[in-house]
Image (cartoon, rainbow, N blue to C red):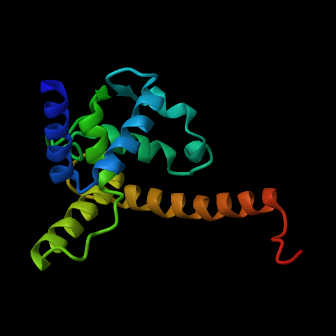
Amino acid sequence: MGAAHSASEEVRELEGKTGFSSDQIEQLHRRFKQLSGDQPTIRKENFNNVPDLELNPIRSKIVRAFFDNRNLRKGSSGLADEINFEDFLTIMSYFRPIDTTLGEEQVELSRKEKLKFLFHMYDSDSDGRITLEEYRNVKWWRSCSRETLTLKRSRLGPLQTGP
């Protein structure tokens, strides 16, 4: 009984920190366990088997973002070697749509957090600035994204619109 009570208390705490519902947390926990091989932490290598990231041109930036201490709210620079489930949820919460039913102040705070997350993805040297070279990388990645999308579409063939 105590363990079940403690687990539900932990889920409520995670709901408050991340904005995910208990069902979403449960689903993300299953995904975390799948990625980690049922281990308590995930390492960068665990993302090598994610099919949705395979052709993504900013794959390395996305994976790096999961381990960036700034995004984990654990420091102003550096990368973690591994992340636990709560860290995983913290990063996944940046991808959640903004809940517009929240107060204006909370909506603005959420927007700022998402912008910081994106900024950290491109501020690769953690100096608090996006240099011209880092900006060029952003533009280069965007052009790669278009090429990847075109490549994916060509693999799928023409769209079928009728029977």
Answer with left or right where residue 130 lies relative to residue 60: left
Q: Quadrant of residue 145?
A: bottom right
Residue drawn at x 18%, y 73% as measured from the top left: 107
Question: Furthest residue to the right?
Answer: 163
Residue drawn at x 32%, y 59% as measured from the top left: 118
Question: Furthest residue to the front?
Answer: 1
Figure disc tally: 0
- Up the image or down, 103 lies above or below 74; here it is below
Image coordinates for residue 26, horizontal then vertical, percent = 35, 42
Residue drawn at x 62%, y 65% as measured from the top left: 146
- Up the image or down, 59 lies above or below 21; here it is above
Q: Observer-nearest residue: 88 or 43?
A: 88
Answer with left or right where residue 162 lies relative to residue 45: right
Residue 130 can be seen, yes or no:
no
Image coordinates for residue 5, horizontal then vertical, percent = 14, 33
Residue 149 can be seen, yes or no:
yes
Answer with left or right where residue 8 lies relative to residue 149: left
Answer with left or right where residue 39 lies relative to residue 52: left
Q: Observer-nearest residue: 125 or 160?
A: 160
Residue drawn at x 20%, y 54% as measured from the top left: 128
For the N terminus, the quadrant is: top left
Q: Quadrant of residue 2?
A: top left
Q: Observer-nearest residue: 129 or 25?
A: 25
For the C terminus, the quadrant is: bottom right
- Up the image or down, 101 lies above or below 39; here it is below
